[in-house]
Amino acid sequence: MRILVLNAGSSSLKYRVFDIAARRETVVGKGTVERIGFPDSPVHDHTEAVQEALRTIGDVDAVGHRVVHGGERFKESAMIDHSVELAIEECSPLAPLHNPHNLACYRAARKLLPHLPQVAVFDTAFFQSLPPHVYLYALPLEYYERDHVRRYGFHGTSHRYVSAKAAEALGIAPEEAKLITCHLGNGCSVCAIEGGRAVDISMGFTPLEGVVMGTRSGDIDPGIIFHLARAKGMALGEIEALLNHQSGLLGLSGRSNDMRDLVQAASSGDVRAELSIEVFCYRIRKYIGAYWAVLGGADAVVFTGGIGENSHAVRDRIQQGLGCLGGFLALVIPTNEELLIAQDTARLVSGRGRTLTPR
Ligand code: ADP
């Protein structure tokens, strides 16, 4: 079965084609359409981007979409029909920069390949197992009940994929594994997983919460926002841009959001680069310690994402001082969100229902 996986960002569309055979998956095509909607770009919107992708890939049997926000409705991946399409649209206010593009890609694929089944795989679904005391903020409860303000978590496909792979590598049944997974890419998140289910995640209502990221601040005192508005007269949009695009490693270092640049600069004596790496590692260490307590110990701490997979120095630094936890295995597992989307799609399309554990 050939599965097309579409992963739409606000101005890019990554696509990959998998040939899924029994217990073996091969990538048979891939590419990225960039600069969607830029004034000088020939690709005006996501519909044209899907058209562009389809030009090169040959026949496929089904399409799997990464969908960022599934709200509280989607606890697992779903075949897209009219009611699922409407529900994804209803979640758009929670992810206004993502869900509309994911939907545009679904609609374009439906138009261009009208007979093919399509599946949505949600970034948030893995965290629908969080209990209320974990997902609730201490706001008046109406803000959850009426306005859906709660912790949702993101990067679910990656945490789910690497945790299953880690259990396999450890030779532990997924139902028995206790894991702390650290997805450290441009966006970063840390997740506590027990028995194949997420029990806590560092990202919250939006991907802003949690550890320090490339350009996102991670956890800050919300009082800072009011202070910046009052004392500096900053507009809400300016503060939002500050926290999402000018903070994190970029803001602290004043140099780059790319960890490779910072490691190199720090080794040549750049004090701000060194400090930004220290803040980054310290915050992750705190989350690992907290999740260790939440889980009552863990079989392994798993690193993934561009930084987690490639930077020995950063992994070592995060683990400094964690010896107090009494010893744990640190594993490096390359993530593969597209593969998990393809596997879920193949499973749902061939009527095999859901499986929370990827192969
Ligand atoms: P995205 O979240 O956009 O998918 P990636 O998972 O590719 O991002 O991660 C990007 C990050 O990984 C960048 O900060 C990059 O510097 C970092 N990275 C990649 N290779 C290395 C390396 N060898 N050492 C340190 N950081 C690395």
Image (cartoon, rainbow, N blue to C red):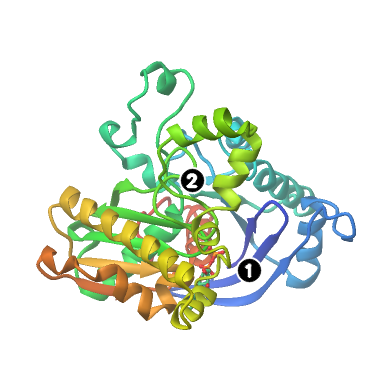
Q: Does residue 120 lie above or below 268 as drawn?
A: above
Residue 332 showing in the rendered view: no
Say whether residue 221 is left or right of residue 42. Answer: left
Q: Are marks 1 and 2 in contact (CB under 8 Å)?
A: no
Residues packed near mark 2 inside 10 Å, few (<14), some (14 to 19) or many (20 plus):
many
| Residue 150 place in picture, x, y as percent | 41, 32
> What residue does disc 2 label?
208
| Residue 102 place in picture, x, y as percent | 65, 47
Please report whichever mark, 1 or 2, sits nearer to the chain's N-terminal start. Answer: 1
Q: Secondary structure at mark 1?
A: strand
Say whether residue 124 is left or right of residue 257. Answer: left
Of badges 1 and 2, the one in the foreground is 2
> What residue does disc 1 label?
16
Which image quarter holds the C terminus?
bottom left
Dividing the picture into quadrants, the one containing residue 303 is bottom left
Q: Which residue is nearer to you in this view: 307 or 278?
A: 278
Residue 336 showing in the rendered view: yes
Dividing the picture into quadrants, the one containing residue 231 is top right
Residue at x 48%, y 71% (from the top left corner): 306
| Residue 88 place in picture, x, y as percent | 59, 37
Q: Which residue type does callout 1 highlight? A: Arg
Q: Does residue 195 lie above or below 254 as drawn?
A: above
Which image quarter holds the N terminus?
bottom right
Residue at x 46%, y 26% (from the top left corner): 148
Q: Which residue is nearer to you in this view: 48 or 242?
A: 242
Residue at x 42%, y 75% (from the top left corner): 309
Q: Does residue 220 lie above or below 321 as drawn?
A: above
| Residue 44 place in picture, x, y as percent | 85, 53
Q: Which residue is nearer to you in this view: 118 or 266?
A: 266
Q: CA distance from mark 1 to mark 2?
A: 28 Å
